[in-house]
Amino acid sequence: MGRRAFEGLTETMFYVLMAFLRAERCGTEVVEFIRHKTRDRLTLGPGTLYTILGKFQEEGFLTEIAVEGRKRTYQLTESGEKRYQEEVARLRACVADAESEEERP
């Protein structure tokens, strides 16, 4: 059985998609969003960030909407938002499983 692309996103991938839910952003804005959202728990270097952005573009989760010199701005696609929502549902199910296990005598 073939594995679906990006099934079970990494934490970093999840936050990159989250960064685009409410706004289009450039790379430095994504890094700042994630740093702020996770209260400095998660930081991204440029290599990691641009690798993820490239893969998400290839997969159709993001689209590049502007280029100004070296600054590239991206926007979440419908497919990207769907993938983000699927991951939220998967994570909620994991937490529900953990909570139900903790409740067992």
Image: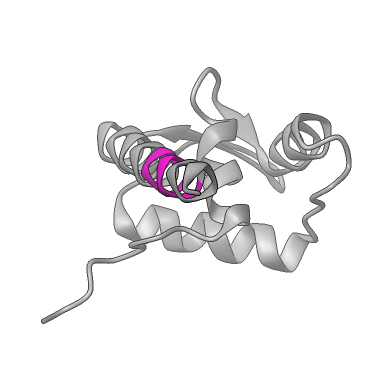
Residue 94 part of the magenta-drawn span:
yes
The quadrant holding residue 52 is bottom right
Can you name the residue that lies furthest to the right here? 40
Query: Vertically, is 33 above or below 9?
Result: above
Main SS, magenta residues: helix
Query: Vertically, is 30 above or below 57?
Result: above
Can you name the residue that lies furthest to the left here? 1
The foreground one among 97 and 56 is: 97
Q: Could you tell me which residue is drawn at 77 percent across and 56 percent down? A: 44
Can you name the residue that lies furthest to the front here? 105
Colour scheme of the picture: one colour
Residue 80 position in % (x across, y down): 34, 40
Residue 68 position in % (x across, y down): 66, 36
Q: Could you tell me which residue is drawn at 82 percent across and 52 percent down? A: 43
Residue 59 position in % (x across, y down): 31, 58
The foreground one among 105 and 46 is: 105
Q: Could you tell me which residue is drawn at 15 percent across and 79 percent down? A: 2
Left or right relative to 69: residue 100: left
Q: Could you tell me which residue is drawn at 54 percent across and 34 percent down? A: 18
Which region shows up in magenta? 92-98
Q: Quadrant of the N terminus?
A: bottom left
The foreground one among 75 and 79 is: 79
Left or right relative to 56: residue 38: right
Left or right relative to 92: residue 43: right
Q: How many labels does the image show?
A: 0
Residue 79 position in % (x across, y down): 26, 40
Residue 78 part of the magenta-drawn span:
no
